[in-house]
Amino acid sequence: MPGTANDPIDEPAHAEAPGKPARRGKSTPAKDGSGPNAAKPSTAAARLAKLGLRRPVDLVLHLPLRYEDETTLETIGEATRRAGLGLAAQVEGEVVSNEVTFRPRRQLVVKIADDTGELTLRFLNFYGSQTKQMAEGVRLRVRGEIRGGFFGAEMVHPTVRPVVAEEALPDRLTPVYPATAGISQAYLRKAIGGALSRTPMPETLPQPVLRGPLASLKLAPLMDCLRLLHNPPPQESEAALADRSHPAWIRIKFDELLAQQISLRRSQAARREKNAPSMPRRADGLLTRFLAALPFKLTGAQQRVVEEIAADMTLPHPMHRLLQGDVGSGKTIVAALAACQAIDAGYQAALMAPTEILAEQHYRKLSAWLEPLGVPVAWLAGSLKAKAKREAVALAESGEAKLVIGTHALIQDGVRFANLGLAVVDEQHRFGVAQRLALRGKAGAADATAPSDKAPHQLMMSATPIPRTLAMTYYADLDVSVIDELPPGRTPIVTRLVNDARRDEVIERVHHAAAEGRQVYWVCPLIEESEALQLQTAVETYETLVAALPDLRVGLVHGRLPPVEKVAVMEDFSANRMQVLVATTVIEVGVDVPNASLMVIEHAERFGLAQLHQLRGRVGRGSAESVCLLMYQAPLSPTAKERLATMRETTDGFEIARRDLQIRGPGEFLGARQSGEAMLRFADLETDAWLVDPAQEAAELMLARFPEAVEAHLSRWLGGREHFLKA
Ligand code: ADP
Ligand code: MG
């Protein structure tokens, strides 16, 4: 029984036949769905749901990331002759040796051979199971880029699978789907193939739209496009499929952009219908007194964004504004001024930050500014003792606290506000959409018998500069303010790349900086595969530095530290009782210690650009010249090289974001948390910008004249996800 396309998946597709080894994607190392037990319906459906695949139509619209050409097989001799050209090859051979070596670093080295030659396979990250899978004598089919290594031709991290007897080659390109741990490509292919054959996908674009404003696009029928993309016939252009310029991709991208444009218009309309408290600015209020008491003058850019926000808050409709400003540009004060305006108008304000360190710092700073002016500020975090927490919750609920600052603890059940008028979310990209919504939902709910019909104004802040077009599209109905100027008196940060082999010199530098009264951050390497390992590395680094710098006070902060200790260490560092702070990426966001002027990042090649930029932004906050040393371990991959070069060449967050986007593409750029639910999975705002105008035109026409088509189209593309747009 096929059901309709938009129903939930009630009958999971059959798992892979037992015994046939599935190919292992990079993200599905140890377990995959290829075993005989993988067909357990609940787990299969749950795993698909993790990818957002709940309905047959979701499977049909789960399109390949890329394709692999497995239709040909070369001999090792043929393939190695092309070594170093950066080309992919597929070969088969028998494992002749398999060993784990430790120089220059721990790695698995496997050699395979056929009658024509030998090829080395190198794995820098590997699992025990892989060593066994590639035992001597096993016949392997491997695919990857052939490089001319030091000891002859090699492949680094190839795709590998054992082959049993003679196995026929496929005659079509093999789709590679976005996957997650626990779901193999083989399983996905089967599930998607099944859904594709069972699920009707009727046209949602009305003929008058297709033949009217869209005529010149010559959009191909959707179903044909989907079949082609999931299973491209051999004669199709591999290049056009790969770069997504193929007409089948164009159709998909258009439909996706159309869904986005329709719901964008809808959520804009919905917001204009909602009420929010109007908060006129008062000349004699807190805001004025606060500005007068500030020890510095706002920059021009700060003044401009303060005006933009203030104007929004005087309107009786909820503000929905993103404040972007590079690290150190002074967003906190802007948030504080907005809070003053809300408080002046008789409302409460809340400020939520993603980490306890950051939230605590905001609390200190803002209460130091505001309490002398008679504004009660409350602090709410997970680490508070039960009694203190109860007190903070009571202050929020009674309305006594005019400003409440905290972490996720702010949005927990049981926390209510008397009359929340402004919700500020700092480093908003660190929060899920649902969490941002939850804070907004806290407005005036204290008295449940008289629910408020007013939504609070919402201000989101981010130092991860998202190019404007991307912001508008991902966060849909959003106004954007940008602080494009740093406070005066900052000296630019000098960034240097240092080979890991010169660690002693780096330590000497740390010593020197401390001798001059400066403070130092030392950031430990990112180890994605294991948090335990990362912690161990951090502890080891800490111990090494303690031993190497006996006359300095060295501290350690990491994610596993109890919040109270974390805060204590940060306090010591802020107060300059500690010269060197060894840290994992917990200090990535928002920490502000102006006296720190040296930043050392170990294994910088493992970090993403946005992360490096955030980390580097912890220094250069005072008047002393700041230095950032990016230590790396050679050899660097081409993208790592590009990232580090970017870091050395520029400190401009927007430029860095632009290059990051170039290197990675928008989906990944926004991080898994956003992209999982983000709207645009296929369309690329740079290359597909030409489709936006026609999509807007079609959206307007459909909203005006074809309401049923609108519903069908939104349901297909967004399912239950439309609310994410309104965040
Ligand atoms: P971010 O935008 O990264 O959140 P902060 O708000 O933490 O930046 O500000 C960074 C530092 O600059 C803080 O120490 C803050 O007090 C200071 N600052 C902010 N605005 C100004 C200004 N107009 N003039 C001088 N210093 C400022
Ligand atoms: Mg900040």
Image (cartoon, grey):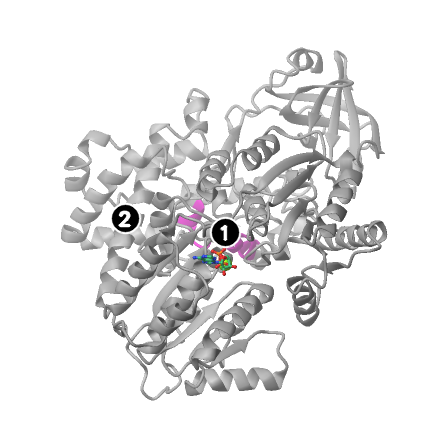
Residue 60 is left or right of residue 611, and the answer is left
User: Is residue 270 inside the magenta stretch?
Assistant: no
Q: Could you give the CA–CA distance between mark 1 and mark 2, rounded to whole angstroms?
A: 32 Å
Q: Which residue is mark 1?
A: 327
For disc 1, the neighbor class at 10 Å (few under 14, some 14 to 19, many from 20) is: many
* Residue hosting label 2: 261
Residue at disc 2, secondary structure: helix
The numbered dot on residue 239 is none
Q: Which residue range is magenta in the image?
A: 44-59
- Give residue 50's position: percent from left, percent from top: 53, 54
Where is residue 45 drawn, in percent x and y? 53, 55
Asked if residue 12 can be seen in this view, the reply is no
- Residue 672 percent location from the top left of the image: 52, 50
> Looking at the picture, does residue 497 appear above or below residue 715?
above
Q: Quadrant of residue 607?
A: top right
Q: Position of residue 594 (x, y in %)?
A: 58, 56
Q: Residue at x 77, y 50 (%)?
A: 537
Badge nearest the viewer, 1 or 2? 1
Q: Residue at x 44, y 76 (%)?
A: 403
Kind of residue at disc 2: Gln
For this rendering, which residue is in front, 410 or 200? 410
Could you tell me which quadrant the C terminus lies in? bottom left
Q: Tell me if residue 476 can be seen.
A: yes
